[in-house]
Image (cartoon, helix red, strand yellow):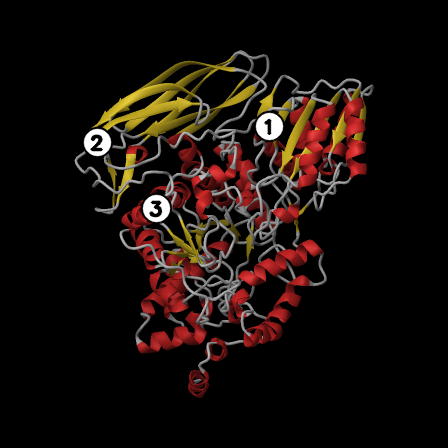
Amino acid sequence: MSPDHTGSVGERARALVAGLTVPQKIRLVSGKDFWRTEDLEATVPAITVADGPHGLRKQVGASDHVGLGGSVPATCFPVAAVLASTWDPELVEEVGRALGREAKAEDVAILLGPGLNLKRHPRGGRNFEYLSEDPLLSGRMAAALVRGIQAEGVGACAKHFAANNQETARMVVDTVVDERTLRETYLRGFEIVLAESSPAAVMTAYNQVNGEFCSDHAHLVGEVLRGEWGYDGLVVSDWGGTNDRVAGLAVGLDLEMPGGAHAFDAEIEAAVAAGRLPVASLDRAATRVLEAALRWQEVPGRGTPADLDAHHTLARRVAAAGTVLLTNDGILPLRPQGTLGVVGAFATQPRYQGAGSSQVTPTRLDSLWDVLTATLAEQAPDVSVQHAPGYDAATGATTDTLVGQATRLAAAADQVVLLVGMPGREEAEGRDRAGVRLPDGHERLVRAVLEVNPRTVVVLCHGGGVELDWADRPAALVEAYLGGQAGGAALVDVLLGAAEPGGRLAESVPVRVVDLAADANFPGHPRQVEYRERSFIGYRFHDTWSVPARFPFGHGLSYTRFEHRAVEVSGIGTDLTVTVELANVGDRAGSEVVQVYVAGPGRLLQRPLKELQGFAKVHAAAGESVRARVRLYRRSFTVWDVASGRWVVEPGRHEVLVGSSSAHLYHRHAVDLESDDPPAPAARTVGPVAGDEEYADLLGHPVPVPARARPFTRSSPLSDLGSSWAGRRLLGLVGRPMARRFADGGSAEREELLESVLAGLPVRALAQMGPGPVTFARLDRLLALLNGEPLRAVGRRRTD
């Protein structure tokens, strides 16, 4: 079979598929190994995919999907939490282009990112890898990243579709969520990224939504993604996240990954032969896989080395642009004199990225200490810079000796920079955080240093929200998150004033996490999590239910000052343009983010007090005036009407609110709207968390009972098998080889992560991703035995 380079990619792919046998088509829709698709003889070569939300993670040799193995060096850009905090789509698009160039240099056809699941709760273990608590901000920033990646010819993969907002039991948990909340909150970001950037691929999530696994979800994938949204790109499973391959093909899941075991092949072939799976469904999936491979063949410049020095410089600029200045009494930017004390092990051992599938091997790594001392040696040689570690960087623990050293240094210093945060082992894919406070050692150190020197700048280095009951005590409080390989240098730029802290919070910082509505059901039952808070997460909760955040969504200070001199709202009906004239009245250049919220009437439906519907970031030199424009559309004013299954406008008075955060609004504009299709009145709740009857009304059916651990099924987590002697025996025979495959004599932190990941794997993963010849037929016999059904097990063996 010789390559045909005539006609469109789609026509060529369809022609190739038409000439294949059913077994050949089946092989195409499962991966060849961990990171490659199947090749088609000498006609279409395999393509390589790789993790890449904030940096390319291309693995060679031994592979895994949770960041345990190494990868080729690549630029480690700031994590998604920082990218979103820039509120700057143009800058994030630059990052996307750099990611695309590095992927192209390594012959990677598809980058598995961005991740745009929402930060439903501060303890989410993967929050560093997600963009925001708000779907519009998530969608717009993700779309920018996709546009940049795909401008280089590399495909981007939006993930994880959908309602994947926790790591606890992530591969089996059932997310119970009402349709309106699902549409308005958890699907909207995906809808935006598809509309504004057309990603090459979408990855389904591990979890279930309302009783169906996302990988074969008829409503989510078949009706919404493929049908209503008209998405015709590649839909790929998360690694080991395929539940029912036949059902998945029927609804539109094209590619199973990693797939090297081809565990589902026999079931697919039997379903096609019996007519339960139309050949047309298999053909569509195989065609999309080949289309991706054929497109990659036509991309110019593959293998051309990327400019890694330029990318490091970009990473430094982005880290500064996403750094959020939470408080400042004027100490920043620093004017070092006398002795500058630097406290914290993170100054010399940077905390710069999270653990898991997004973990990048950096091309280089800047520490704050190295860059700061070099900079001051040149700019202020009379300043004495001294350091005390204060705590163990890996564990966060401290000792009396370490605290004593730090406080003596702080007491003698004219100014102090104190770096604290979460150790890497506390923030990782595969498990949620145990708490929301800094480690005890960090808390103790903060209080001790502030006690002896109030002229202290506290810098936070972490991936998710933390409680900060001492936030008003430092002279300045800086949110740096995880700034990537150039984060240390970017922090020096911000602290010394070479760059402004350009970030604004993309997530609210609560006073107490227990006050959040989502906290009542996070992470939920081991088999089921109920979104009883509905859309009331983040600022939607704080503002609607009058529970002030410590730092509100959108908040961030600057080194200059902007005046909002004129606000105009023009247009007709729902097609409006908000124009804001701003003047930089400070003595240095800076940026401002204009945020536009819409408040609906809320007479027919219970809804958040206001919701972000647009934003614009502007830059201005000292003394310069600029204009920011934000467009609003019909969708900016709509709600999801469950009764009709449509987006509709609720009639009545709406308000367009303009501000610099969700809590700081400086302009209101009333808009009276009529509607030919008003929503049907829906159930309301008395408080932010729906009770049993209220939740049943919202769902339209009784609240489901969580699934029981017995009988064991293919979707039972491996941890459940430990409840029986035979199950423990099975884990010993099969689970240990899988563990050895990834562990490879790693650190205690690595083994901890591996243990939590393996415990959450469903039983079917032994066939999908296991190290040996474990077929589904054998697995089903073992499950029958574990369930006390020996006759059924024997019967299955006879029919194998």
Q: Is residue 5 visible?
A: no
Disc 1 target residue: 471
Residue 680: which numbered mark, if any?
Answer: none
Residue 376 percent location from the top left of the image:
77, 24
- Earlier in the chain: of badge 2 and badge 1, it is 1
Residue type of the residue flagged with mark 3 = Gly
Looking at the image, is 265 positioned above or below residue 172? Answer: below
CB within 8 Å, label 2 to label 1: no
Disc 2 from disc 1: Cα separation? 43 Å
What is the C-alpha distance between the residues marked 3 and 2? 29 Å
Secondary element under disc 2, as helix, strand or loop, is loop
Residue 651: assigned label? 2
Task: Report the residue at 37% width, 16% height from top.
Answer: 567
Determine which of the numbered discs, if any, sits on residue 691 in the image. 3
Q: Where is residue 563? Give x, y as percent.
A: 47, 13
**Residue farthest to the left, as pictured:** 676
